[in-house]
Amino acid sequence: MKPWEANIRKTVPYVPGEQPDKPRMIKLNTNENPYPPAPGVAESLYTFDAGNLRKYPDPAAGGLVRALAKRYRVKTEQVFAGVGSDDVLAMAFLTFFNSEKPVLFPDITYSFYEVWADVFRIPFEKVPLDERFRIRSRDYARENGGIIFPNPNAPTGEAESLALVEDILKQNRDVIVIVDEAYIDFGGQSALALLQDYDNLLVVQTFSKSRSLAGMRIGYAIGSAELIGYLNDVKYSFNSYTLSQPAIAAGMAALVDESYFKETIHKIVTTRERVKGEFQKLGFASGTSQSNFLFVTHPHIPAKELFEALKEHNIYVRYFDKPRIDNYLRITIGTDEEMDALLYFLRDYISRRDAGM
């Protein structure tokens, strides 16, 4: 080791899904929306005055915050906006998880939680999901320094009831509970309905999935005015100007067209339920995904084998070489045409494999 390496913070980084750029590929590995954002988004960018880029953006992202507050019927001081939900969650970890007691989150969940805890030197414990990959609220009824979990969960897609979320809140009034709702628009009940009764609840959502703006990096948190105030204090101590002017404009435009938003969600959910049935016909088992992806396993074909075979044919899905889930694939819901191409390949692959046995 070189002398200067002794003072470098080392960590095992988060590994994002591949971002290949190949002709005629089918990309189903990063839970992006297969449909374009609302038409008003393109118009907002087309009419954007590039001359304004010489100025800093509004540090409070006021226009977007007001639009979000109106959309979710909360006060503006209850809304925090950041550069994707990853940025918002990182700020939340830094702001709220400062106890010597461990932060709790599921053992099968968004792997960035462990990375942030490591980077910020936050003690943590991973709480095992049950055999159906579901959260047991009683497992969180113990001393801790905070709680975070996604609902619906990633990568399983399972959505927990609002009653279970409230049960966790009731048992943990002395710490901050963060519910990461990146996929809530595709199914499940949002914890936003509980904000009035729990001032220690922070709900985090994103424009990346349901609003087709992963490339713009827009995330937000909604909670009590007190929690949002603390978040802003940390933000302004770290980086005042987070969201760019085009991102703020695009986010505001996306919130205007509610009918397009609902139409897109309906298409994805309809495709998800159809494809779920087709996977079952092929022998795959899957949970009751309420997200924009499926989490599937086959009883006779290893997930890694399928992952590699699909990749060779320019079909990209996500494989996690981790305990308990190393025989599962996470497959984003694409367009009907993309999903039909995936199913065609799987039918052919399984048929040829069975014939060769």
Image: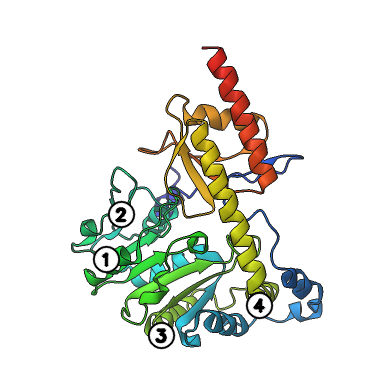
How far apart are the two marked residues, 1 and 4, measured between alpha carbons?
A: 34 Å
Tell me, yes or no, whether the two marked residues, 2 and 1, touch with CB atoms within 8 Å: yes
| Type of amino acid at the residue the image marks with label 1 | Ile
Where in the figure is residue 262, as x and y percent of width and height? 61, 67
Residue 67 visible, this angle: yes
| Type of amino acid at the residue the image marks with label 3 | Ala
Tell me, yes or no, whether the two marked residues, 3 and 4, touch with CB atoms within 8 Å: no
| Type of amino acid at the residue the image marks with label 2 | Ile
Residue labelled with disc 3: 225
**Which mark lies nearer to you, 3 or 1?**
1
How far apart are the two marked residues, 3 and 4, measured between alpha carbons?
A: 24 Å
How far apart are the two marked residues, 4 and 2, measured between alpha carbons?
A: 35 Å
User: Residue at image x 66%, y 60%?
Assistant: 215
Residue labelled with disc 2: 135
Identify the mark at residue 256; answer none if there is no mark: 4
Query: What is the crowding at mark 4: few (fewer than 14 residues within 10 Å), some, or many (at least 20)?
Result: some
- Vertical side of 173 occupied by 345: above or below: above
Where, by quadrant of the figure, is residue 92 drawn? bottom left
Describe the element under mark 3 as helix, strand or loop.
Answer: helix
**Which mark lies nearer to you, 3 or 4?**
4
User: Residue at image x 65%, y 29%?
Assistant: 312
- On-image quarter of the N terminus: top left
Residue labelled with disc 1: 168
Q: Earlier in the sequence, mark 2 or mark 1?
A: 2
Describe the element under mark 1 as helix, strand or loop.
Answer: helix
